[in-house]
Image (tube, helix red, strand yellow):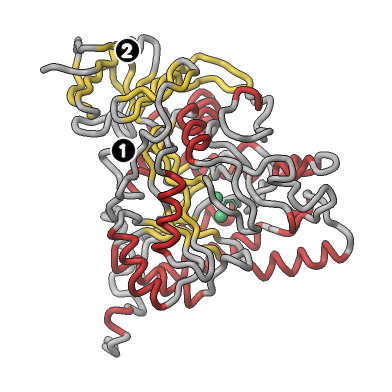
Amino acid sequence: MELDLVITNGTVATASDTFRADIGIRDGRIAAIAENLSGAREIDASGKLVLPGGVEAHCHIAQESATGGMTADDYRSGSISAAFGGNSSFIPFAAQHRGVGVTETLDLYDSRAEGNSVIDYGYHLIVADPTEEVLRDELPQAFARGITSFKVFMTYDLMKIDDGQFLDILSVAKTHGALTMVHAENSGIIRWISDRLVAAGHTQPRYHAVSHPAAAESEAINRAITLARFVDAPLLIVHVSTTEGAGMVAQARLEGAKIFGETCPQYLFLTKGDLDRPSMEGAKFMCSPPVRDAGTQEALWRHLQAGTFSVFSSDHAPYRFDESGKLANGPDATFKQIANGMPGIALRLPLLFSEGVRAGRITLNQFVALGSTNAAKLYGMHPEKGTIAIGSDADIAIWDPEETRTVTVEDQHDNMDYTPFEGQQITGWPVTVLSRGETVMDGGKLVAKPGRGRFIARRPPDFTGYPGTRTPELDPARNFGADIAP
Ligand code: DUC
Ligand code: ZN
Ligand code: ZN
């Protein structure tokens, strides 16, 4: 068998197994996993780990924020930065704004992505305006186009939906087998505290954390899970930041509900103490929900270990520390007027590898599951993405588990002027990233041309194994036809 490329002598790891093997690639796909392969080109991976390329499932690229500003990264810089962080595909958001249709939104994001991405990509659709036409026609059309997940917001005045709209979206999603994602924070609690803090002159970035208490997240997660279970629809809670919220996800999963959770590096590596930095420096560490405390970090690690979280994502939301981003409303802006979010697309996997795998908190296989396989499964692109198996796309990241580097903004490939992880020592870095058998990044150099990345038309995910509620209290398909069970 003629192979185009063989990766020799490496230690291969998937979400389930770790083994020594050569990987043979032909026509962009994995064609052989065996001993002593040879091919037209070879990469010697002696001493290295050969892993599925990361699937970055939560990042904001070429997207207007809830406050109107544009992210610093577009599909070119964002995808390049992702590749340097060991990712071979990513799923940013396509954000519908009120008064704009879904199809128009998706066309806009196609034009932003095409010709720019170095890795394969899809979008999660943010639904902010679920009109009758959107629910009846445009969401089904989006699914047909390969957008099988979308996000809703329970907070932010310009984005949030009410409980009835949430039920509408969950019901449409259920009909099509799509996955709804939710930003779960209680809008009323946040507004109530914020108004009072600002009126009392407490406007600095540190009050952002005060105004987004754990109770705001846990109330909203509880409500979101209740609504999803009510109509027996699958739901993924993104960026879980609290012990209480993680506990609710764990409990729902224990009860067989189709509930999934995600957490992010900032909740494991940063604390609200970081927002206390002088002047506006704290703005660099502002994200929603906010970073918490050391006790919460430990609890979230335990939930990662125990399997509460299916995915670990960066929530890369890059706003520069200048007037294009964090300082858009001037140096005296209140915390309410500062864009929420921080960069991290290139550091997600190295941080998890170093403090997770190397520090003995999680296994290498859990690392692969959290960083790649589970996202590929939940977002309908497995087994092409997210694993090393015969027939899968040759999306592979080769890691040097011994390389140690200290994070600095100068080494980043995004379009940012800071990293919140500056100074963090990390052991274990991706050294080569392949996408469909083509080298994207090698030895710290970008090899691929922007525009080679393809749109991934995703399938509905498989929820087998999550029995949910077989006869929900209300089933739109039955009860709106007034079929009332005895
Ligand atoms: N939610 C996100 O998912 N990312 C950035 C800001 C936000 O509110
Ligand atoms: Zn969010
Ligand atoms: Zn986000």
Amino acid bearing label 2: Ile
* Residue 317 percent across, percent down from the top left: 59, 45
- Is residue 296 shown left or right of residue 386? right
Q: Which mark is residue 43?
A: 2
Q: Which mark is residue 385?
A: 1
Farthest right residue in view: 201
Q: CA distance from mark 1 to mark 2?
A: 21 Å
Residue at horizontal 81%, vertical 39%?
277
Residue at horizontal 30%, vertical 45%?
381
Residue at horizontal 52%, vertical 14%?
403
Can residue 141 be seen here? The reply is yes
* Residue 8 percent across, percent down from the top left: 28, 12
For label 1, the SS is loop
For label 2, the SS is strand
Label 1 environment density (alpha carbons within 10 Å; few <14, some 14–19, many ≥20): many
Q: Nearer the viewer, residue 266 or 157?
A: 157
Amino acid bearing label 1: Lys
* Quadrant (top left/top right/bottom left/bottom right) for the N terminus: top left
> Counting residues from the N terminus, which is met first, the one under dot 1 or under dot 2?
2
Q: Nearer the viewer, residue 413 or 161?
A: 413
Q: Which mark is residue 174?
A: none
Q: Mark 2 and ligand 3: say if the CB distance to the nearest ligand atom is below 8 Å.
A: no
- Is residue 275 shown left or right of residue 385? right
Q: Nearer the viewer, residue 121 or 229?
A: 121
* Quadrant (top left/top right/bottom left/bottom right) for the C terminus: bottom left
* Residue 16 percent across, percent down from the top left: 31, 33
Vertical comparison of 440 with 304: above or below: above
Residue at horizontal 52%, vertical 54%?
247
* Residue 416 percent across, percent down from the top left: 64, 35
- Is residue 441 shown left or right of residue 466? right
For residue 399, what is the image quadrant?
top left
For residue 188, what is the image quadrant?
bottom right
